[in-house]
Image (tube, rainbow, N blue to C red):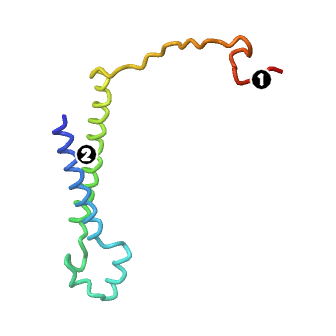
Amino acid sequence: MDTVETFLLILLVLNAITLGVLVLVQQGQGANVGAAFGSGAASTMFGGRGPGGVLVKATTFLAVGFFAISFGLAYIAKERAAGIDDVGMPQAIEQPVEVPADDRNDGFPDVPDL
């Protein structure tokens, strides 16, 4: 189980880094207004229309993968926590404690007599 968890953690970190890079590479919605007035949009890396479908689909795929990996790790953690009872962890046993009573002040030795 540790190997699967380690693999999923590495996959989650790589997914998060790739997802962050893809989000930063994409243009915002307001960037298209400047392209309409000839601000050199045709000379961009993805052409005049922008990245459009490829980066949006890759971002969606990575986001869904991120959630799926996170749910998988949560399931593994839940199963591991449920299995702790089977390991033989010591249980807390409550035992009554007998306290000797002080006859003079009903068990409160620091209270002065009135």
Q: Position of residue 102 (x, y in %)?
A: 68, 13
Badge 2: residue crowd in 10 Å (few <14, some 14–19, many ≥20):
some
Figure check: 79 above or below 60: above
Total marks shown come to: 2
Disc 1 to disc 2, how far (Cα)? 66 Å
Q: Quadrant of the N terminus?
A: top left
Pick the residue in front: 105 or 1.
105
Q: Which amino acid, mark 1?
A: Pro
Q: Earlier in the sequence, mark 1 or mark 2?
A: 2
Figure check: 68 above or below 85: below
Image quadrant assignment for residue 53 = bottom left
Contact check, label 1 and label 2, Cβ < 8 Å: no
Q: Residue at x 32, y 22 (%)?
A: 89
Image quadrant assignment for residue 32 = bottom left
The circle drawn on residue 112 is: 1
The circle drawn on residue 4 is: none
Q: Position of residue 12 (x, y in %)?
A: 24, 50
Image quadrant assignment for residue 45 = bottom left
Task: Give the SS element for disc 1.
Answer: loop
Q: Quadrant of the C terminus?
A: top right
Q: Is residue 14 left or right of residue 30?
A: left
Q: Which residue is mark 2?
A: 69
Q: Residue at x 35, y 20 (%)?
A: 90
Q: Residue at x 38, y 19 (%)?
A: 91
Q: Nearer the viewer, mark 1 or mark 2?
A: 1
Figure check: 26 above or below 91: below
Q: Which amino acid, mark 2?
A: Ile
Q: Position of residue 2 (x, y in %)?
A: 19, 37
